Image: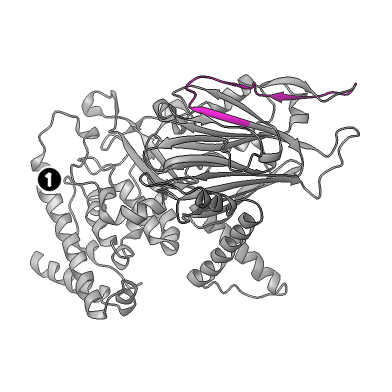
Amino acid sequence: MAKSQAKNVERRTIRERSRSEVAESSGGSSFDGFIGSAVVVVVAALLALATHMFWPKMLSSDVPRAITPLGLPKLTELPQFGGESEERMLWGTYRPGCYLGLRMRRPQSILVGLMWFDPLKAARAPPNDIGLRHWAQEGDKLAKYGWRYHDGSTFGQQEILDGEVRLVTDFVKSSAEGSGYGGDWALRIRASRKPTAEPLATGEGPGKISLVFYVAHEDIAGASDWRLGGRSSEEGAALLAGVDDLIGEWGLHTGGSASTGKLRAFGVKTAHMHNLTDLVKGNLRVRGTGRGKQKARYPELPEDVEDGANILMFQLTTALPLDAEFVLLSSPKHGQVLPESKAQRLEGLRGAKLEALVESKVAEFQERFGRTFELKPWQDASGDKMKAGMQEMAQAALSNTLGAMGYFYGQSLVNSKAEGGRVMEYWPTALYTAVPSRSFFPRGFLWDEGFHQLLVQQWDPQISRSALAHWLDLLNTDGWIPREQILGEEARARVPSEFVVQASTPDSPLAHPPPLFLLLPLLPHTPGGGLLLPMIFYLGFPPTHPLPLSLLTFPDM
């Protein structure tokens, strides 16, 4: 009976995987696609069965099972996730819990972020309530914040409506000749008063904004060779420079208002990255500026940089409208970088050329979106207006899912009745995942990720496979994954203490819904996806549960 069922499984999977369009998308002939797809699925099934039957017998460790890794090779170390793919995805908006936060997809990364406040209102407010924006929070009561466009890897444009001020942030990457590993990137922040804003009181001028742009390193030693440059518009001069073992020699340059305005530099040395908002609030002081009887008084950071500082903050207080640019240039670790190459790359990521690059990225996104989803909305009395509105909403839905992809590193806290209920640390691990809510749940949720990736895999299957591989690397020997992944200080600071510790199976009264199973019919039809199948089976059917072979069949798509 078992042999007959297995043969039916094999015939079904081969038939499903022999589709001509799948073979064509993999770049081979129909026959090659037929054979290759069949092999992937059959091997995946055999690996799943072998893992299910024999792995528990191989265990020999005094480490509690709840915090013992499955013990198989890491999926994230597969060749498909290295090389060009790894480099392409190095930098990104991988700190979704911030209104704007960048980092690399690696532990102990350089962090980049933005804070802002209204200096006119802050000067009259209590020190603890100056309206400083940093973390995405419901309590800030912003009218709107979210990604208008985001391609998941090289570009994102976000709109933020904060009271009377409208901010637009653009993040764009470039891999121009002469750049180092991961390429270069530019970040542009534009701020203006909303057209519908109430007139300002007499004497308040055109309205002001204070930005706090920061660069930090999670490892104090990683910033040991940072060099603070001039804070003027000197051509080619770096605001901040350093050396990184991945991206080589790097320099942070400015453009727009960030070059023409006065930047105050404040730096501290600390191992903690979870309390940067409090760090700024605790160091802002109201100081007088200007001349004459009516001196303006704004909260400002001290111009003081501690020796060995691994957090550098640059404050820019200026009248609206504002257009500030920050450009990071990397360098190859080996070989000389010609000055003219560096100058050309910098020029291409500032001013009019940056604007042209952003416009081209928006056009590319819209063209790819139309080609990928082929939306055909209904028509009613509003005609084209309805069509355009639906298209915009659909683009925002995709962009905010991609813009919510984050990278986290740390150790989950779990407990187990088998260990007397004591709290234990899971092994150190990385997680690349979408988050359900940037403001309320800026962390990974096992229950949600299957739904996230149903959408993302249609746009970029490689992103989905990478996220899934990270999740499956969290499997312990019982086939269990902590439901919430609260990794690192920044993530843990956003969670009430009573929800931090995860109860391990079978102690938890809650069963894990199987949303990752929703991806099963899709994985065999994407290059490299079949290699993830055995781990998903182990997640759903650990050794203590029967494994129904009927799940190895794939329905018509």
Please indicate, yes or no, whether residue 389 appears anywhere in the rendered image: yes
Q: Quadrant of residue 224?
A: top left
In the rendered structure, the answer to whether residue 357 lies left or right of residue 249 reads right
218 lies above or below 392: above
In the rendered structure, the answer to whether residue 543 lies left or right of residue 19 reads left
Residue 296 in the magenta stretch? The answer is yes
Residue 430 image position (x, y, % from top left): 34, 40
Residue 486 in the magenta stretch? The answer is no
533 lies above or below 120: below
Residue displayed at 85% across by 36% down: 205
Q: Nearer the viewer, residue 66 or 488?
A: 488
In the rendered structure, the answer to whether residue 211 lies left or right of residue 72 reads right
- As helix, strand or loop, the secondary structure at mark 1 comes to helix
Per the rendered image, the range of residues in magenta is 293-314
Dot 1 crowding, Cα within 10 Å, few <14, some 14–19, many 20+? some
Q: Quadrant of residue 26?
A: bottom left
Q: Amino acid at mark 1?
A: Trp
Q: Nearer the viewer, residue 467 or 512?
A: 467
Residue located beneath label 1 in the image: 55
Residue displayed at 37% across by 45% down: 446
In the rendered structure, the answer to whether residue 520 lies left or right of residue 62 reads right
207 lies above or below 421: below
Residue displayed at 18% across by 68% down: 39
